[in-house]
Image (spheres, helix red, strand yellow):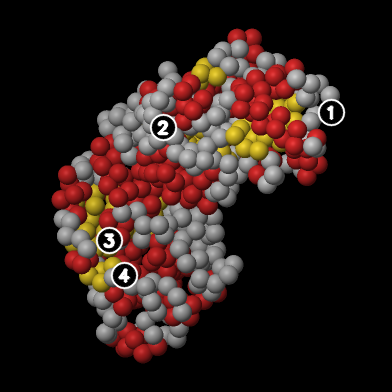
Amino acid sequence: MTREKHDRMANAIRFLSMDAVQAANSGHPGLPMGAADVATVLFSKFLKFDPTNPKWADRDRFVLSAGHGSMLLYSLLYLTGYEDITIDEIKNFRQLGAKTAGHPEYGHAAGIETTTGPLGQGIANAVGMAIAERKLADEFTGDLVDHYTYALVGDGCLMEGISQEAISLAGHLKLNKLIVLWDDNKITIDGAVSLSDSTDQRARFEASGWATEAVDGHDPDAIAAAIEKAKSSDKPTMIACATTIGFGAPTKAGTSGAHGSPLGPEEIAGTRAALGWSAEPFEVPSEILDDWRLVGLNAAKERVTWEKRLAGSSQKAEFERRMRGELPTGFVSAIADYKKQLVKDLPKVATRKASEMALNVINAALPETIGGSADLTGSNNTKTPQMTPITPDDFSGRYIYYGIREHGMAAAMNGMSLHGGIIPYGGAFLIFSDYCRPSMRLASLMEIRNIFVMTHDSIGLGEDGPTHQPVEQLASLRAIPNHNVFRPADVTETAECWQLALESEKTPSTLALTRQGLPAVRKEYNEENMCAYGAYELATASDDAVVTLFASGSEVEIVLAAREKLEAMGHPTRVISVPCMELFEKQSADYQKAIIGQAQVRIAVEAAIRQSWDRFIGWDGDFIGMNSFGASAPIDDLYNHFGITADAVVAAAEAKLHKKEA
């Protein structure tokens, strides 16, 4: 490609981007203008993709980690011929209902590999994608899986702490098919990067096990040579591309004025003159558009040869099943057989142990599960005999030691799920969901199947004290739209919750699990998954109920004991187990009404704060739980100290009954 042709193609990105931002009167023109040369080289010379088959399994993944520069991606998708991004979508940038949202949104349009915007997320997602690629390449032979993951990052991505978690994990695992292109423009919204940061980014990456290169980000030959070298490296590579933000703008280039605001009519006119672009806004001259469309057509050729390899592979059916995200036949029957065994054995175990027991069945039935933990494997119980470790030199295992990188773990899991072919789950303490929460929220926003195993779920963890005892985290996670928070009460509920999490293709799940042992409360086999209702009647009243007790997890044991006492006192009492509030809200109005019932007294019990329980007990119902932080003490002392006991439930019920009688 001649330099003149390259410049024309890169300028098409620049002018589509600045025109779209100007029309929207909102957006970030600087990055697309500065990174246009890097993107042009990547897409025209290296990226393996097919606009006519955007979900092709062996495509290269391109992640725009610096999601504020979204017009770079939208311009590329339009220019290379993705049907979802038309010129009208470009014109409607940032408008209601447009596929060209302010930041790239996964699922809005083909070619958007992940939702980015919160800085640092994209590079961490890319690490997960690269893990998935290497894992599947180890599992499926015949070059069915052989692609690269590219991430374009900005200064903000590299300042966010999650970036260090991500790059150190990638360097440790030697993810040599991960290539990060750093838009090194030395500008943030506040101004020069030097105002706030003096990090030697290349040294940081190298210290984390990466190869690095530095190039002029406006020299296409230098960019191409660096990418070519990166593709032959035995390490992940970061290429520092020195660019000018707002390249071509006569007064704003190289300044923060080009970062997050429209350039303005005069500046755009000056840029057109400076770069020799005479076309009207949103118009790409036909010869330039033809050059770009040819890039898309040529890229598609590799898909055709790949499909021939797939057609001749003995692993074709399994590969396609995995990439579709379908669970294998036999999974449901394996869970059913396991539940039958549980009601015979009635084991008293912590639900973290119950989770491990369920995983032993699940991991044997599902080869696509990849487990892991943020340095808490023995506490989270996330590793089963099938799960040998993945190591830098051997990806045949199915377990990742993430180290103390909760946020990096959660974001990498998102990337693995987005890549396809893998169902990731990862463990931490529930209190550290605070570290994972931005990625958990994005998993919900993207509607992907991720499973977060959060143990030590209440004051019941004991002596570690209030810094480790979650009290508000359950309510916080329940507040996330499209996120199922499961808190099972025993071994059977744990198995059912795991089944639901695995079957939930578009909703991520959190399993909140105990440290302390819990008795089996489900003592008869039921083919139906009762946890699927979100809440169900676990124990009926001897007559028309005057008291209904609601609880989740470890507190179900407490309300069952309280029920026995209340029944003995002549107060018909029923118990409702509430393993998942989100699923309960999806039930019919009649079912919800029947479960909540008409009892005079409604009491909820959970070793956490009240928030989220009023939907069951109403504003005038009683709640027994936490209204403060916890304390450091043995578990029994803590429950007695904070009044989360069967006797406290009985006393509250009696007080309410006497009050109503009066």
Amino acid on which disc 1 is placed: Asp
Question: Which of pointers 4 and 2 indicates the residue nearer the eye?
Answer: 2
Q: Are marks 4 and 1 in contact (CB under 8 Å)?
A: no
Dot 2: few (<14), some (14–19), or many (≥20) neighbours within 10 Å?
Answer: many
Q: Earlier in the sequence, mark 4 or mark 1?
A: 4
Q: Earlier in the sequence, mark 1 or mark 3?
A: 3
Q: Marks 4 and 1, how far apart in space?
A: 64 Å
- Where is residue 479? Give x, y as percent: 56, 48
Q: Earlier in the sequence, mark 3 or mark 2?
A: 3
Give me the residue at 44% from left, 39% from top.
Answer: 629
Amino acid on which disc 4 is placed: Ile
Amino acid on which disc 3 is placed: Asp
For label 4, the residue is 189
Quarter holding the N terminus is bottom left
Q: Are marks 3 and 2 in contact (CB under 8 Å)?
A: no
For label 3, the residue is 155
Q: Are marks 4 and 3 in contact (CB under 8 Å)?
A: no
Amino acid on which disc 2 is placed: Ala
Give me the residue at 70% from left, 32% from top.
Answer: 655
Give me the residue at 33% from left, 39% from top.
Answer: 405
Question: Which of pointers 1 and 3 indicates the residue nearer the eye?
Answer: 1
Q: Are marks 1 and 3 in contact (CB under 8 Å)?
A: no
Q: Marks 4 and 2, how far apart in space?
A: 43 Å
Q: Earlier in the sequence, mark 4 or mark 2?
A: 4
Q: Earlier in the sequence, mark 1 or mark 2?
A: 1
The image quadrant of residue 569 is top right
Q: Nearer the viewer, residue 620 or 131?
A: 620
For label 2, the residue is 631
Q: Secondary structure at mark 2?
A: loop
Q: Secondary structure at mark 1?
A: loop
Task: Spot the residue most to the right.
Answer: 544
